[in-house]
Image (cartoon, rainbow, N blue to C red):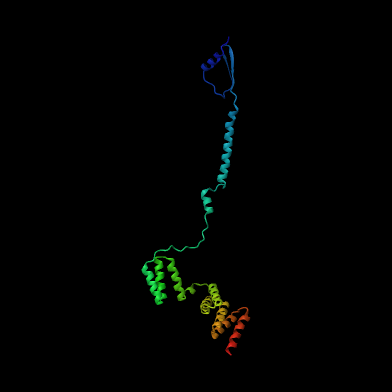
């Protein structure tokens, strides 16, 4: 009777162990031929390389997405959502104005010294920027007629027209004077507007000069100017 365990004992004591990937080996032990073959890989052995390929493929796709611009990152997305700057300079926050400044301004207003009040308010606003001070400065400039110096030609023209329509003829004349001073070379509109306002104010000679100047500058329609000139001549008889 042959002991089946003898080959196993023989293989364990017979030298170096063999790995799973070794070639078939033939040995002769005690008259028996023992043929050892490499073990077959199980299905589970194929899963390792397959999983590795999947991971590598996924990693390559992520790299293409990351570096190809698909993911812009939090900084880029945050930048896209930020509101655009308007470019408008915001006024400084209000600072506390000393009481003596307000008292000084009240006194000067009561005296009608708007020029001095303007000087005090502008100096105080440099030291302590304040919206109420800026409002007073705007009012003082208007009282002194300085606000008109800040106007452009179209603005002065529009304000003169608006004041005339509302019946504020003296104010309309002030704005018309500014418009004439700012009028571009060859412009006739400002002269016609001021001439019309002067007609309404009954200042015939000055009105005639402006209306004739408007004609010389090529105001159209000329019939409107001629109508006002005829009106002045008729009222002079």
Q: Residue furthest left?
A: 100
How far from the left and from the top, in percent, is residue 54? 59, 36
Q: Which residue is at 44% across, 68% downward?
A: 134
Q: Nearer the viewer, residue 20 or 211?
A: 211
Can you see residue 56?
yes
Q: Looking at the image, is 20 positioned above or below residue 228? A: above
Q: Nearer the viewer, residue 119 or 32?
A: 119
How far from the left and from the top, in percent, is residue 108? 39, 74
How far from the left and from the top, in percent, is residue 227? 62, 83
Q: Which residue is at 59% across, 31% downward?
A: 47
How far from the left and from the top, in percent, is residue 175? 52, 76
Please identify the quadrant where the N terminus is shown: top right
Can you see residue 186?
no
Q: Which residue is at 58% across, 41% downward?
A: 61
User: In which quarter of the view is residue 28 placed?
Assistant: top right
Please identify the quadrant where the C terminus is shown: bottom right
Q: Residue furthest bottom?
A: 237
Q: Looking at the image, is 74 positioned above or below residue 208? A: above
């Amino acid at each position: 009777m042959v002991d089946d365990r003898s080959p196993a004992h023989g293989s364990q004591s017979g030298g170096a162990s063999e790995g799973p990937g070794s070639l078939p080996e033939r040995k002769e032990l005690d008259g028996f031929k023992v043929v050892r073959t490499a073990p077959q890989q199980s299905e589970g052995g194929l899963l390792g390389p397959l999983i590795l390929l999947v991971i590598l493929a996924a990693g390559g796709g992520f790299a293409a997405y990351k570096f190809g611009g698909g993911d812009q990152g939090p900084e880029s997305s945050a930048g896209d959502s930020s509101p655009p700057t308007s470019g408008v300079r915001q006024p400084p926050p209000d600072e506390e104005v000393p009481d003596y400044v307000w008292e000084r301004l009240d006194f000067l207003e009561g005296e009608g010294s708007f020029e001095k009040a303007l000087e005090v308010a502008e100096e105080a606003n440099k030291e302590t920027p304040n919206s109420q001070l800026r409002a007073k400065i705007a009012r003082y400039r208007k009282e002194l007629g300085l606000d008109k110096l800040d106007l452009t030609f179209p603005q002065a023209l529009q304000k003169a027209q608006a004041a005339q329509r509302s019946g504020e003829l003296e104010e309309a004349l002030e704005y018309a004077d500014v418009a004439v001073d700012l009028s571009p070379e060859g412009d006739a509109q400002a002269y016609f507007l001021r001439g019309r306002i002067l007609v309404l104010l009954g200042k015939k000679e000055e009105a005639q000069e402006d209306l004739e100047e408007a004609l010389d500058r090529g105001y159209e329609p000329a019939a409107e100017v001629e109508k006002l000139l005829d009106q002045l001549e008729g009222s002079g008889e």
